[in-house]
Amino acid sequence: MARRANVPANGRRRSTIREVADRAGVSVATVSRILSGDYPASPTTRKRVMLAVEELDYVANAHARALAGTSAKSVAIVLNSVISPAYAHVAQGVEAQTAAEGRLCLIGTTGGDPERELAMVQFMREQHAEAVILVGNVVADETYHKRMSRYAHGLAAIGSRLVLCGRPPLGPDVPAVVVEYDHAGGAFAATSHLLSAGHERILCLGSRPGYSTAEGRVAGYRRALAAHRVPHDPALEVEGMMEWHEGYRMMKERLATGAPDFTAVFALNDLIAGGAVRALTEEGLRVPDDVSIVGFDDLQPSLDLDLTTVHLSHEEVGRTAVRLALEHEARGGTPPHVTIGTHLVIRNSARPRRMS
Amino acid sequence: MARRANVPANGRRRSTIREVADRAGVSVATVSRILSGDYPASPTTRKRVMLAVEELDYVANAHARALAGTSAKSVAIVLNSVISPAYAHVAQGVEAQTAAEGRLCLIGTTGGDPERELAMVQFMREQHAEAVILVGNVVADETYHKRMSRYAHGLAAIGSRLVLCGRPPLGPDVPAVVVEYDHAGGAFAATSHLLSAGHERILCLGSRPGYSTAEGRVAGYRRALAAHRVPHDPALEVEGMMEWHEGYRMMKERLATGAPDFTAVFALNDLIAGGAVRALTEEGLRVPDDVSIVGFDDLQPSLDLDLTTVHLSHEEVGRTAVRLALEHEARGGTPPHVTIGTHLVIRNSARPRRMS
């Protein structure tokens, strides 16, 4: 059906749902249900309807559908950015599970700005998204608690739900589904791996006081030192963000003062590990012969570095978030709270400490 | 304001826009305009209004706002996945520019499925998104043309616009903004760099007949060979997808037959380069001493590989897409069509061919 470009909307009559139904040879109710995604139609019927929709250029009147209670079902995920491989993989998991459940998945990014987060959560609420999934590293203070609590109650009030992924839970009286990562357990395993290989001076790159992800991992690092009765030296904890260039900066600055006062490195994520390895290489230090390194996440560039690291299935986190949210929608009751485990992947970036 | 969890929506009166206005000490019109994002309010006023919205848990009635013509303005980007660093970086650019322009940015993924793409475009159209940006590698056949043309006309009919990013243009009578990448030019430069260094047998990893991105880059590779009067050997073009594991597979399979019959590699993106380097290393071949390699994108893992590669600013592509779309909205006329250039970044993964 040819159309003239730039014809104003108010100068042309739009196709109606009845015209779509007639073209597809089905009832209006069938068209409505198929478009809202909750009708288990035969593939043939569905194809006929979608073809009619395309050919007639049908735009469902959102108002009419809202009144009829047949708005497209959606799940929303709100994260800091899609650049971070960790967040992108969670989003991928959310998206895959959402598609499998026949819903639309919307992704919104905030750049870490609470105002943009609020705007996005409100928008998703207006869409009557079935679940709004918030992902990522936060400063979990009183302001954060209040904000999350408002979101949770606000969504619950319209029959939707808040899902927190990789963020600290809010307490028993806040209606939110929680999917936590075992940051501390993974970090404990990574650090223990180095300690068991004889390393005692282990640099920890990427601490960030107040931020839940980093704090969880540093806690695991410290717990492992204590378990192996190795003294904790706060000067071995270097502050920085979880980015490749930060890993590079932190290691360059450390090495600028002279020969390394450590034999191994625990990088709080694999991006940091990448930057750190680059800095070590530039200073003539080989991994693992001179300095061992372990990372966290098992995401890029872990394969390129042949990196021993903590595997955390970010996609599984995303899929679980959706699954739990939709199950809770169906069953009600106390919102579930689960922790996704980790395991160490042994590659070739760490070796026993050389006793000179 | 404390709320009881799970209170059904129909059992509690919702706050009205008037209550928000009263709480913030401004007019209803001001609240409405601030929420729709197109009111240049003072930061103080805006803060007061947003605080009142939060405290009163105000959910704008989407219908009422649509009728009043004050729906939240949004820009949508639809891509295959957020896992691919190239797409994620374009999305980041779209998101940054959108936020700068005071709009909401929605990201949708399709997994490459045309039906999900249709559902997403329709959804965005119902939201009256100002622009719908489609990104990524496609098979640009007749079906694709028809589909894109329908989207373009359908969006134009309601005063919105389609933006194609990194996809072939549709011709002069289709109302779409086009932002192209100079795939062929970048590939020409990369291949020429190797040819100028004396390499004649250059393996090309990641061809994919029919797919616009790969075809553009292979065209540049062939053009460079022709320009340097080096014979084109089709057996040096290896088919595969633009993923790390594909690069690994392609190289492993190539090396399985014996010593390399090439002295250099042009990987059609940096992920392929990463996998290929890993395979070379496993077979005892060093980069660049034994085999030179050049990539494309300048994304992970280019820094970890110290990779000479074609730099394409994916974020710039995203920002440009938004900028052009919103300018077109303001000015009308023929939709713009621009090409984003590339440049070679020389690092240390390629060296002159050793003449034995």
Image (cartoon, coloured by chain):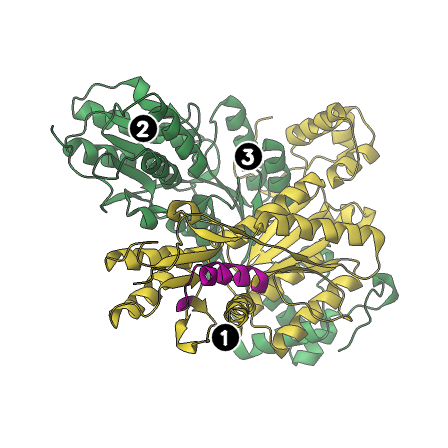
Chain colours: A yellow, B green
Residue under pointer 3: B112
Q: Secondary structure at mark 3?
A: loop
Whether A194 is among the magenta residues is yes
Residue under pointer 2: B204
User: Along the line of sight, which residue is nearer the eye, A325 or B276?
Assistant: B276
Three-letter amino acid code of the residue under disc 3: Gly
User: Along the line of sight, which residue is nearer the eye, B127 or B254?
Assistant: B254
Q: Please tell me in which quadrant of the rendered image residue B196 appears.
A: top left
Q: Please tell me in which quadrant of the rendered image residue A120 appears.
A: bottom right
Q: Position of residue B74 (x, y in %)?
A: 56, 54
Alpha carbon distance from label 2 to label 1: 47 Å
Q: Secondary structure at mark 1?
A: loop
Residue A278 higher or lower than A304, as above or below: below
Three-letter amino acid code of the residue under disc 2: Cys
Alpha carbon distance from label 3 to label 2: 24 Å
Quadrant containing the N terminus of chain A is top right
Q: Which residues are magenta?
A: A184-204
Whether B334 is among the magenta residues is no
User: What residue is shown at x 50% (from left), y 67% (from top)?
Assistant: A221
Q: Position of residue B12 (x, y in %)?
A: 85, 68
